[in-house]
Image (cartoon, rainbow, N blue to C red):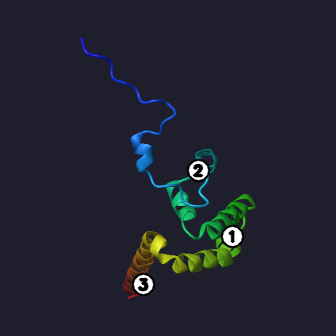
């Protein structure tokens, strides 16, 4: 018969916990993170994880207000969107994946517009 495995005392931190780095300064408790992150999309969490958290939060509020009040989102939120973009450019090392995707989408839109122009010209002939 083998002897039961000895359990570590409950008040002692386990080995894995001791190997973890300390929480970064200003980090929130898991409960606060859970409340804030509950129901948020991965994109929103990513955007709020970088240096443009406040700018993104302002942009989110503007978008929500525009949708609620049936306002033109592009017109209403243009200055806030520009401020967010400027912030993202200033923190480009973090936001690089989003900036790259945005640039690619812009390039693809230009290609599509050029195709439409060609088709339109051919239709006029």
Report the Cα–Cα distance between label 3 and label 1. 27 Å
Residue 41 is tagged as none
Q: Which residue is mark 3?
A: 117
Q: Position of residue 97 (x, y in %)?
A: 43, 70
Report the Cα–Cα distance between label 2 and label 1. 28 Å
Q: Position of residue 17 (x, y in %)?
A: 44, 44
Residue at 42% across / 86% down in the picture?
Answer: 124
Residue 37 is tagged as 2
Where, by quadrant of the figure, is residue 45 drawn?
Answer: bottom right
**N-term mark: 3 or 1:** 1
Residue at 54% across / 80% down in the picture?
Answer: 90
Residue that extends furthest to the left in the rendered view of this protein: 1
Q: Which residue is mark 1?
A: 72
Q: Is residue 15 visible?
A: yes
Q: Is residue 7 left or right of residue 40?
A: left
Query: At numbered mark 2, what does the secondary structure look like: helix, strand or loop?
Result: helix
Closer-to-camera residue (70/8): 8
Q: Is residue 108 left or right of residue 10?
A: left
For discs 3 and 1, the disc positioned in front in the rendered view: 1
Q: Position of residue 75 (x, y in %)?
A: 68, 75
For discs 2 and 1, the disc positioned in front in the rendered view: 2
Where, by quadrant of the figure, is residue 121 drawn?
Answer: bottom left
Q: Is residue 102 visible?
A: no
């Amino acid at each position: 018969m083998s002897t039961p495995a000895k359990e570590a005392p409950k008040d002692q931190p386990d080995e894995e916990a001791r190997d973890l780095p300390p929480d970064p300064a200003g980090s929130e408790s898991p409960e606060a993170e859970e409340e804030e992150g509950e129901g948020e999309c991965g994109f929103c969490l990513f955007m709020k994880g970088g240096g443009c958290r406040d700018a993104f939060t302002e942009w989110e509020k503007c978008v929500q207000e525009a949708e609620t009040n049936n306002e033109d989102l592009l017109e209403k939120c243009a200055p806030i969107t520009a401020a967010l973009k400027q912030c993202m450019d200033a923190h480009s090392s973090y936001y690089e994946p989003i900036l790259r995707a945005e640039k690619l989408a812009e390039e693809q839109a230009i290609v599509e517009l050029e195709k439409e122009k060609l088709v339109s010209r051919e239709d006029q002939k």
